[in-house]
Image (cartoon, rainbow, N blue to C red):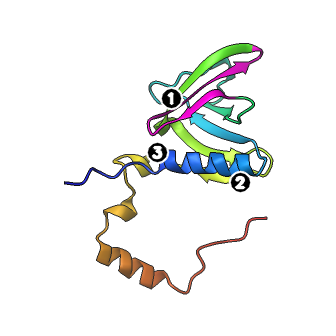
Amino acid sequence: MPNPSRSKRPYLIRAMHEWMADNGNTPHIVIDTSIDGVTVPDEHVKDGKIILNISEAAAHNLKLTNDSVSFRARFGGVPFDVWVPMASVLGIYSRETGQGMIFSHDSDAAGHTDQEEQSPTQQADDIESNRGRAHLRIIK
């Protein structure tokens, strides 16, 4: 029997992190600090969120696992061990370009999206009905 579908979020974050690093950009993640288990310096939290630089230069011993993001960083010169559950990561973007991805809380609620709950026939019908309309747009 197959395992339930895993969240795409950690895989997409790792891919975007690598792509940004390869292009000389500085990856940042946006964290929802209201999620249980988030360990970040409280004094840097604003409106329930914190933005963390996860570049190689800033995030020492960075681990991007399927369950969490963890690393050691300096905040105001003080070392701090950061640990955030993957579900608390709202997005990843490049500081230089602003390009990245935003995630919703409910997209991974059961490990899959609404689109994945549809039967293959429903998905094919949806694809056919959407042909002819542009789905991508140019970002400059």
First in residue order: circle 3 vs circle 1: 1
In the picture as drawn, the residue positioned furthest to the bottom comes out as 132
Image coordinates for residue 116, horizontal then vertical, percent: 36, 62
The region drawn magenta spans 59-77
- SS category of the residue bearing label 1: loop
The residue positioned 39% from the left and 57% from the top of the image is: 113
First in residue order: circle 3 vs circle 2: 2
First in residue order: circle 1 vs circle 2: 1
Position above or below: 52 against 82: below
The residue positioned 50% from the left and 49% from the top of the image is: 11
Mark linked to residue 105: 3
Q: Amino acid at mark 2?
A: Gln
Would you say residue 74 sits in the magenta stretch?
Answer: yes
Mark linked to residue 34: 1
Position above or below: 48 against 109: above
The residue identified by callout 2 is: 99
Residue 104 visible (yes or no): no
* Crowd class of label 3 (few under 14; some 14 to 19; many from 20; radius 10 Å): few
Which of the two discs, 3 and 2, sits closer to the camera?
2
Image coordinates for residue 76, horizontal then vertical, percent: 77, 17
Residue 94 visible (yes or no): yes
Position above or below: 18 against 82: below
Q: Is residue 107 left or right of residue 24?
A: left
Q: What's the CA distance linking mark 3 and mark 2?
A: 20 Å
Which of the two discs, 1 and 2, sits closer to the camera?
2
Q: Amino acid at mark 3?
A: His
Q: Amino acid at mark 1?
A: Ser
Q: Is residue 63 left or right of residue 123?
A: right
